């Protein structure tokens, strides 16, 4: 996302290599090849859902690549007197991992005051603009009403869940937006909404009168005295005043419609060709980049959630239409691969959670 500084000669060399026959890239990949993608869910124990994703990690050196950590946290909001919205709401934010040395000990902080490890070459103003741009892209796409989960309501018109999605860019080695959306989708997929049970305290007005009159009756008739608890949870959906969290082994239910969460595919345009998963020098050498966010709730009818075109170049409507069609094909392949990995992680996480609950 943040362009790396390259010289004119280096830019010309990279462009000539990409447009050669056959095309040449610095790491030997084809134009449509992704680097290795590593994904793990459940990396933040205190979050309701979390994921860590790496694109391009060097297998022999054990480091490198673009790395993003995403986590979700649910908070209770009051609809009547607070900032809560009936049905719940989703708030996204993007930051980076800043490392500051204090007393010769490295301390990792999520601040903008110190130099972030992902973007050490950027000024504070450029960091603010970058953070704002990434947050807006994520919020406008993930927070769109068409993707809103239906199970963020706790008590209708009284209490609801606020879903905070926080993404931290730990390192940027190119293609940060695609990595950001993949990590966000994995964290939302992993999110568990705690099950709630409505509770209301009722104190019947005639309870004391009934007991006083019953005391004069025969002992054998005492069974007729109503003994209902003050906490009745059978018919409280309309009059509930509060809620409680029942204990389940799986820590809650998944977000409704989690299959709809979008993926992003970035087309790096160097007309007449284009390529995927650019490295920082490649990103700085192309005149245009197109971000396409696709949702595949229905495999037969994918939906283009949003689109961004960055750079000084120009495209006509026919070219844009062609690139959107190509991007849908790439996004579907990325979606299918990510979906398969997420289901594998589901099996791994659920087995561990069930075994841990059984040992309590």
Image (spheres, helix red, strand yellow):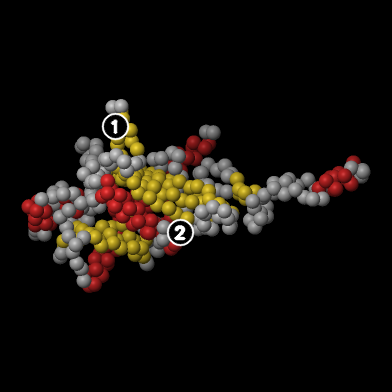
Residue at 28% over, 62% down = 308
**In the rendered image, is residue 78 in sight?**
yes
What residue lies at 37% left-to-right and 61% top-to-bottom? 296
| Residue in the foreground of this view, choosing between 67 and 296 | 67
Query: Considering only vertical position in the picture, is 179 above or below 45?
Result: below
Is residue 313 left or right of 115 when viewed as pictured?
left
Instruction: Give the Cα separation between the discs numbered 1 and 2.
Output: 41 Å
Front-most of 148 and 337?
148
* Location of residue 92 with respect to 117 vertically, above or below: below
Tags 1 and 2 touching, CB below 8 Å: no
Looking at the picture, how far across and down is residue 223, in whole percent? 84, 45
- Residue furthest toward the top? 103
Residue highlighted by disc 1: 101
Q: Picture coordinates of residue 22 (x, y %)? A: 10, 57
Q: Judge by depth and name the residue closer to the eye, 50 or 317.
A: 317
Residue 5 in the image: x percent, y percent? 16, 49
Q: Which residue is mark 2?
A: 148
Q: Residues within 10 Å of mark 2 (few under 14, many from 20)?
A: many
């Amino acid at each position: 996302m943040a362009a790396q500084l390259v010289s004119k000669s280096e830019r010309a060399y990279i462009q000539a290599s990409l447009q050669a026959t056959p095309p040449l890239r610095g790491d030997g990949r084809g134009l449509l090849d992704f680097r290795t993608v590593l994904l793990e869910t459940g990396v933040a124990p205190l979050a309701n859902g979390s994921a860590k994703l790496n694109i391009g990690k060097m297998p022999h050196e054990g480091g490198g690549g673009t790395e993003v950590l995403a986590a979700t946290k649910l908070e209770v909001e009051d609809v009547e007197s607070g900032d809560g919205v009936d049905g719940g709401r989703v708030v996204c934010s993007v930051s980076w991992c800043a490392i500051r040395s204090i007393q010769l000990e490295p301390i990792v902080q999520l601040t903008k005051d110190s130099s972030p490890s992902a973007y050490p070459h950027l000024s504070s103003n450029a960091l603010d603009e970058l953070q704002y741009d990434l947050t807006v892209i994520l919020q406008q796409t993930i927070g769109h009403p068409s993707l809103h989960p239906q199970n963020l309501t706790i008590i209708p018109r009284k209490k609801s869940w606020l879903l905070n999605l926080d993404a931290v860019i730990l390192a940027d080695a190119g293609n940060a937006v695609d990595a950001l959306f993949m990590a966000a989708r994995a964290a939302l997929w992993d999110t568990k909404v705690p099950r709630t049970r409505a509770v209301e305290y009722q104190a019947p007005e005639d309870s004391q009168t009934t007991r006083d009159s019953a005391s004069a009756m025969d002992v054998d008739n005492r069974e007729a005295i109503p003994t209902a608890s003050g906490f009745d949870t059978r018919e409280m959906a309309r009059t509930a005043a509060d809620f409680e969290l029942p204990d389940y082994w799986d820590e809650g239910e998944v977000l409704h419609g989690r299959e709809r969460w979008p993926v992003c595919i970035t087309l790096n345009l160097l007309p007449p060709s284009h390529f995927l998963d650019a490295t920082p020098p490649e990103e700085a050498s192309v005149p245009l980049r197109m971000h396409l966010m696709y949702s595949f709730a229905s495999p037969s009818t994918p939906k283009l959630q949003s689109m961004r075109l960055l750079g000084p170049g120009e495209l006509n409507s026919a070219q844009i239409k062609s690139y959107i069609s190509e991007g849908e094909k790439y996004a579907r392949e990325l979606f299918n691969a990510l979906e398969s990995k997420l289901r594998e992680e589901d099996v791994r996480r659920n087995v561990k959670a069930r075994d841990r609950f059984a040992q309590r």
